[in-house]
Amino acid sequence: MTSNTEVLAEPRVGFIHLQINNPMIAWLAYRGLLSSVDAVDSSFLSVWQVATLTSAVSESPVFFDREMALERARAKNNPGAVSRLRGLYIFPTREEAERAAFEWDGFRSAFLAPVRVRAGSTLSTYDADWISNWAADGGADSARRYAVGEPRSVTPHWEHLVSGEVELHSIELREQAYEVVKAWWPDSLGLLELGRLAAEIDLPLGYIAAFPLGDPPAGEVRVRFMMNLADAQNPALLAYMESLPPERVNGTDLHRQPWLLPDLRAREFSVPISHWIWSSPR
């Protein structure tokens, strides 16, 4: 491991910002177990990758250009560190998290929650001030110094990137997430409950991620969102559910009919192959 990167021998507490007004993020939050894409399937795309690719096809690809510069710097100068495009973003303290909510557009204190990063996860530490000041001094040198974990000043704004799994125990945030999912996908609440129970025994059932599909004749990559349903009939899950007392299971939702998958089709988009820098899409 490099100086700013470690494999955790013990769990590590921190704080996460989850924009649960997005129903897909709310779904993942309610499950209670957040996994980086590499911990589930290396062919999946992270939320940050999707945001980066969306910028690539926008009228102002500044975000895409910045993230590509940072990723190239990491790959060249610190390849063992967790990539911004693949990891989960965690703050080491509430103070660092509240600072982000105060300084960054789109961040809200109400969306902050304590988490527990599981042992065995890989964690890299960076100074987010390099990102905050990118417009003023961004460039190859700033990208390199961010990538190796160098502080920008005597008052760095530390953030962690995690490759692995993070437990979300905030009942309040998860209850808010549930209400968001209920408003968007009321006929999917049975599957949401099943996914929550599966996460309690470390099964990825209900995990949502973006998935790239290549279309060489069209010269593009189609990004689709899919849900893991492989463990729906897993005997371990069925046995676990039978072992739980009734008050531990939302039976109303679990037995609600009909059971429909969340409609994720509206989130699909295409990216020119010229903007694709990762492994070949399927």
Image (cartoon, rainbow, N blue to C red):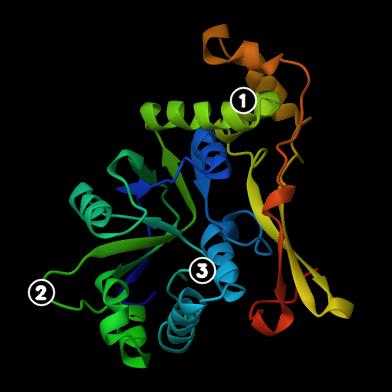
- Residue depicted at x 67% and y 38%: 205
List the residue tagged with mark 1.
193
Element at badge 3?
loop
Rendered position, 113 above or below 215: above
- Residue depicted at x 46% and y 89%: 76
Name which of mark 3 and mark 2 comes first in the sequence: 3
> Which residue is more in the foreground, 212 or 34?
212
- Residue farthest to the right? 217
- Residue depicted at x 21% and y 76%: 151
Element at badge 1?
helix
Q: Residues within 10 Å of mark 2 (few under 14, many from 20)?
A: few
The quadrant in which the C terminus is found is bottom right
The quadrant in which the N terminus is found is bottom left
Give me the C-alpha separation between circle 3 and circle 2: 27 Å
Rendered position, 5 above or below 135: above
In which quarter of the view is residue 159 placed? Answer: bottom left
